[in-house]
Amino acid sequence: MLYHLFTYLDKVFDVPGAGMFQYISFRALGAVITSLFISMIIGHRLIRLLKSKQVGEEIRDLGLEGQQAKKGTPTMGGLIILAAILIPTLLFAKLNNIYIILILVSTVWLGLIGFLDDYIKVFRKNKKGLAGRFKIIGQVGLGIIVGTTMFFSDDIVIRQRTSSAAVVRTSEVFNNEGAQQKSTLFTPTSSKSTKTTIPFFKNNEFDYAILLKWMGNDYAKFAWIVFIPIVILIIIAVSNGANLTDGIDGLATGVSAIIGITLGILAYVSGNIVFASYLNIMYIPDTGELAIYISAFVGACIGFLWYNAYPAQVFMGDTGSLALGGIIAVFAIMIRKEFLIPLLCGIFLIENLSVLLQVSYFKFTRKRFGEGRRIFKMSPLHHHYQILGYHESKIVLRFLIVGIMLAIMTIITLKIR
């Protein structure tokens, strides 16, 4: 809203300083500061409200050290994260941008699913919460919305690189005159495409439509048959991965903040024609605006850590964890970097795999030997280290270090092919 207001004031009344709102970097900085402020202010008040309403977490006895001390800690703190994301985005972003609209819808959609799950657990006293099949239905519904919009909307386009595209030198990146010249490295008009980015390859674009080439000349029209199911699968996997990672104080929040910073960098360079030329990556018009949203996202995560770091004063619950994972998935899909998710979201992936392997191996050995056996002491993986005697603060710190390493490797893929 502020963007549209100050743009109007700048054009009509030439208000000094109003033109700064044209710059993504300025609005991104404003979003992250506002997000931190909101999470700090709202967080303190919401925690007091949750305590007064006795909205406490029911802790399953897993035999972990210090676990029962967390009983009664307020949950549903994901409301803090959602408020700290949505309010700055509404204030600083271009609200007529299709990517902003889509990510806002995704945030609210997943937040509502998580909130309903927490509500059933807390107020209906049902420890199982929302049935798993209904969560999946909700995630599938969002996947259909995102996939359909990405495929059919005329506002979601890319600029193809020309066959004669030259390499941009580092010295030319910040040269304004060179920036205008480098726009010729891409086709003059935008076009619909189902292409995405493949890391570590020189010609790093993959077209989903190619999988249907056997259907004939019009195969590209039916690429949604492949694209939409892949979108659904990614959203379900990453959303549930974040949900599983939210098992000890500060882990899911910290990892999400690191991922968010990385996605913000990827969105900015993908939406900037000069950086896209220099890095030889796909140029996606209008995605630079997502840097405002992801700045609010990172600010919300860091602000929530003020209360969620060990010992946690509040838990995010499914209201936060399902939303965080889903937001990351949708964001990566929109900037066409979804194939980087296994690397960037490696923590979520390994947590998911640890549960899958544990359950599968237990069922297999019980069927074969009559007695179930385990690969890990407990899954998800962070509980395995807890049983081995590691303090949860050390586990979180080491997971975050790994998360930073994965983030750096993800950024490096822009140049290493």
Image: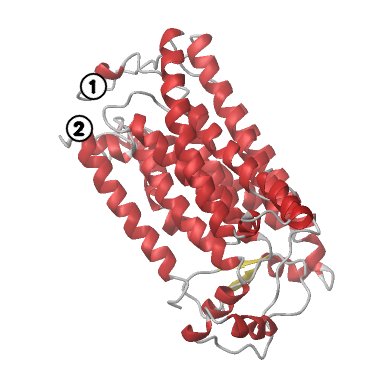
- Residue 67 visible to the viewer: yes
- Residue 387, disc: 2
Quadrant of the rendered structure where residue 271 is?
bottom right
Mark 2: amino acid:
Ile
> Which residue sits at x=42%, y=19%?
47
CB contact under 8 Å: marks 2 and 1: yes
Q: Amino acid at mark 1?
A: Gly
Q: Is residue 259 above or below residue 356?
A: below
Q: Position of residue 179 (x, y in %)?
A: 61, 80
Q: Secondary structure at mark 2?
A: helix
Residue 37 drawn at (x, y percent): 46, 36
Q: Quadrant of residue 208?
A: bottom right
Horizontally, residue 398 falls left or right of residue 202, namely left
What number is the disc on residue 63? Answer: 1
Q: Residues within 10 Å of mark 1 (few under 14, many from 20)?
A: few
Residue ID at (43%, 56%): 344
Label 2 to label 1, Cα distance in Å? 9 Å
